[in-house]
Image (cartoon, helix red, strand yellow):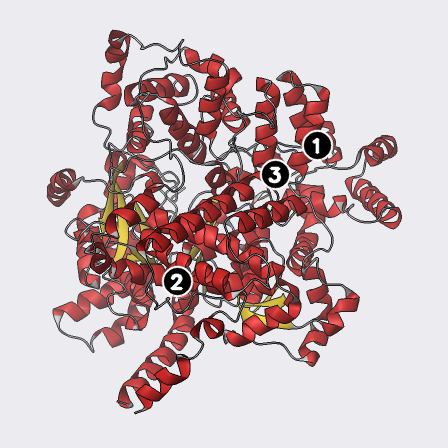
Amino acid sequence: MPSDYDPACLPDLLPLYYRRLFPFAQYYRWLSYGGVQKNYFQNREFSFTLKDDIYVRYQSFSTQSELEKEMQKMNPYKIDIGAVYSHRPSQHNTVKSGSFQALEKELVFDIDMTDYDDVRSCCSAADICSKCWTLMTIAIRILDRALREDFGFQHLLWVYSGRRGVHCWVCDEAARKLSAAARSAVAEYLSLIKGGEEMVKKVILTDPIHPFIRESLGVVKQYFPQYALHDQDILGRKESVDKILALVPEDVRRELQQLFQNERRPEQRWSQIKDQAKKKQATAKKGQHFEKEIMLQYCYPRLDVNVSKGVNHLLKSPFSVHPKTGRISVPMELKDLDKFDPFAVPTISLICEELDRPKADDEDKKSGDTKEKENENGVTEKRKNRDYKRTSLAKYVKCFDQFLDGMAQSWKGELLRKSDLQKEF
Amino acid sequence: MQFINRKKRLVPNPKTELYAQPLQFYGQPPLENISLSEFESFAVDRLKLLKTVENLGVSYVKHSEQYSKKMEAEFKTLNFPYRTEDGAEKRRKDHISHFILRLAYCQTEDLRRWFIQQEVDLFRYRFNDLTSKQKLDFLHKNNLQYNTISVQEKNQLKEKLLNSSYIVSGVTLENEDFYKVPFQDALDLVRARKVYLKDGYAFIPHNDIVTIVLNDFRTRLSKALALTARSLPAVHSDERLQPLLNHLSHSYLGQDYSIQKNVGKISLEQIDSLAGKSFPLCMRQLHQALRENHHLRHGGRMQYGLFLKGIGLSLEQALQFWRMEFIRGKVDADKFDKAYAYGIRHMFGKEGKRADYTPYSCMKVILSNPPGQGDYHEKLTPPLPELLKQKLQFYKVSPSGVNQILELVKGMHYQLACQKYFELTHNVSSDCDSAFSLSHPNQYFIESQKVLGGGKEMKRETDTSQRSQENPATRGSSAAPDPEVIESQHLAEMTENLETFFEDA
């Protein structure tokens, strides 16, 4: 297999990756946000994880080429992005303490498969498979809808973390300016799963059921039969059945235990649970949403709230490499979300190898336009541009490009408004 | 010309005009001259009032009958305007005393936070006490205009609005106004999912308008305090006021439990028995989880680690304690030094920005640390009631006591539940003199030790046993991959070496 990745090779591959493949132009375009605000890129914190887990915080760069040079020199194993500060992070020691403050950052969300260990039977800890990956699909569908429709955000960048989770970067100006209190309020609005290890029942619904929960249930319902009943077989084996039954009221539990003795098919068992819930709801005054609570407990996204709360919290950057798997942290196309396969995401070894393959017809196609720029810089620039296009990274960079084009629309409006204001004086 | 005119108009009856409203936003500072003694007595009274606000908020359910009664009594004894018909004199006191405390409480972040919190609670109580006409009057007088939605829009969103709030029913929806504000202005409602959200706007029923008003009040007060802080040097140059203001601000909050007068008075062997006797449930839970799993996540480490620091563990002891426990689990000594020792030294102010962190108070534990997946630091909110019941029975709490505690937990009054637990396990009753109002896990510990006559049995651990083990832990742990615990790490030298290394490569 050409894509086999060996962590020991990482030090050899990284220089190549940063020299010829990392999409610096797009990256810089993203983080400067059209130059609407002064020093937005310059005051941004980056932090690098180097060889042997050496961690360097408060890196900052004044231009794209400085960023490029520095990354090519340091060859970080991992790149994290932090906040935009009041001063250049690299000079944070030189300003009076207290005045160096994190001002803005994208609103971010981190969903990690390890947090689902109590509700997936296929894998545990850092392992994932195509069965449990559906959980991430559900998470993205639910959060993406809520962030757009409920909170009115538009520029959401979803990124595969490279191993077992996904990140969301909400890049709207309003999102970047949110206070820590507002961030935590948003995160809590979006959190339904409550309680730690010992909590058996992690979702409790009360009347009336908020529209947000109804919408989320709508998403879960699309995936639940195939994912939970079939792939995870939550109503098959005895242990997992017991876990489900622990979530229903005692009298219902007894009745269901009886019914289940004569019924082994999971779909049928699930309808029996639903029937019980309907019966309960008809007689009891309120509450009694246990079938919904089960669906949510098994499928609803589990957020790491602390990541979203802090303005200065760091999060792994898109296009950073995951040192353990070698996979690139790539933007995800929501149109094809159901088809997204984490195992098809290219590893650094694969794309570096693709570079070495003989250049195919694509060389001839492009040879015409290379001639236009004769000076040396132009040529290397062109070559780098084409380099990633020859690898499997291309489609992810294209997805990133589209995201940036969408945002550029809003910058244009903002810049026009600003220049109009200036003319008035 | 105009100047004089305006003055004239104001002069005739300034007080009645200024204090016509039962409640105000404190937009204008008082301009009259007052005596020093009045200055002092006003300030002290308001401070007492705010302290009461804080204590009542902890001991009682906000807006319960008892809460309101106690509040009312306090207003009476301190001579503040508690009823709307109270006259200008009391309102004047309310006005002036508020502004004096602004001077005293604008100086540091902590003071500001405390002051804002209490003033906001106070304001909420008083605003809720107004009649609905007075509320409208208040909005009108203060120019608080919020956008209401049209009838058509209301009908369109009818079902969603009904399902978003407990206080709206089909009947009242017709007559109720809904305000449309950016969701950032109604965070408390958003957080609790008690409001309908669409395209970034929250639709707030009139009954909940206090939320927006409070938000407004909080923002204004916070800005005003920042401005006050800037003009503080001028005030401080007045040598009559400066000592008074300093004194006022020092008497806030009680203790922060960071003063480590008892460092080294506890030995590591004692922790297990102390956990059973004198730890509040939240800490006992953490301790047990740590002993069982040999690991705690970041939030739990911070909460429990700082608590232990507060009861008197020294840095060396803490390192030894955590290391011993962690290496029994999946973490080996090397990994501990690399990944966790930094965080512990950080807690003691030996790394990063070198702040000497104070143990978390109950409020902080409850509000900022809802346990996430795989977290154990639950503040008396364990699992299902049955599990908590089992646990309490296991801890030998009487059946009637168990029920009392469970009732409180159900109502989410965790601090009250915890206090009840204290009373039951220490055989004291809330009516006797030793009663205190619980607001801090370390306070629980100290009170418990007092009751148990403890403190005497603690002895200094022999130095030698510590020293032999502390060395490897305190030596260079340059790597701490947990970004959030690293406030600032100075690895300049190291990276320089690396740079040259990579250049060669």
Q: Is residue B447 above or below residue B64?
A: above
Q: Residue B413, which numbered label?
A: 3
Instruction: Give the residue pinned by disc 1.
Output: A243
Evaluate whether residue B191 shows in this view. yes
Instruction: Give the residue pinned by disc 2.
Output: A176
Amino acid type of the residue tagged 2 in the rendering: Arg
Residue A290 image position (x, y, % from top left): 75, 43
Kind of element beneath mark 3: loop
Q: Measure the alpha-carbon separation of dots 3 and 1.
A: 29 Å
User: What residue is shown at x 33% (from left), y 25% (from top)?
Assistant: B336
Depth check, mark 1 against mark 2: the one in front is 2
Q: Nearer the viewer, residue A354 or A55?
A: A55
Q: Nearer the viewer, residue A324 or B60?
A: B60
Horizontal side of residue A204 vs A372, given as left or right:
right
Tags 3 and 1 on a common chain: no
Kind of element beneath mark 2: helix
Within the image, what quadrant is residue A121 found in?
Answer: top right
